Image (cartoon, grey):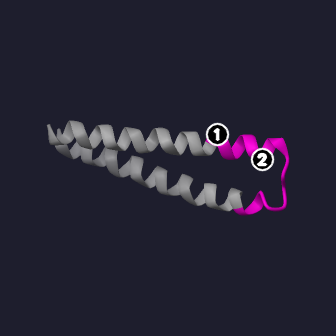
Amino acid sequence: MSKKKSKKIKKLEEHHQYLDRKVQELTKDRMKDRSSESKTVLMRLKKTKLAIKDAILNAKKVLTN
């Protein structure tokens, strides 16, 4: 059971790192592209990244209990 959980956590962490790189790229691009569309995409990525971070923390909490 714990192997399954640790794989899930690892997958979530990898996805979080991917989103972090994308957020950094888009933040850099926003210096040139100030459209509302680029802002919307950036905000959506940041919210998804935060949700994944919460999921990682919850999975780790469950794993330690």
Task: Indicate left or right for 60 with 2 as reference.
Answer: right
Q: Quadrant of residue 41?
A: top right
Q: Which residue is at a point 62% across and 55% down the rendered structure image?
A: 23
Q: At numbered mark 1, what does the secondary structure look like: helix, strand or loop?
A: helix
Who comes first in sequence, dot 1 or dot 2? 2
Q: Is residue 26 above or below residue 59?
A: below
Q: Is residue 2 magenta?
A: no
Q: How many marks?
A: 2
Q: Which residue in the protein does label 1 denote?
A: 44
Q: Are marks 1 and 2 in contact (CB under 8 Å)?
A: no
Task: Indicate left or right for 60 with 39 as reference.
Answer: left
**Disc 2 residue type?**
Ser
Task: Indicate left or right for 10 with 63 as reference.
Answer: right
**Disc 1 residue type?**
Arg
The spot of residue 34 in percent (x, y) is 84, 52
Q: Which residue is at a point 54% across and 40% down the rendered structure image?
A: 48
Q: Which residue is at a point 84% across and 61% down the rendered structure image?
A: 32
Q: Which residue in the protein does label 2 denote?
A: 38
Q: Which residue is at a point 16% across and 42% down the rendered structure image?
A: 64
The spot of residue 57 in percent (x, y) is 32, 43
The spot of residue 28 in percent (x, y) is 72, 63
Q: Is residue 29 magenta?
A: yes
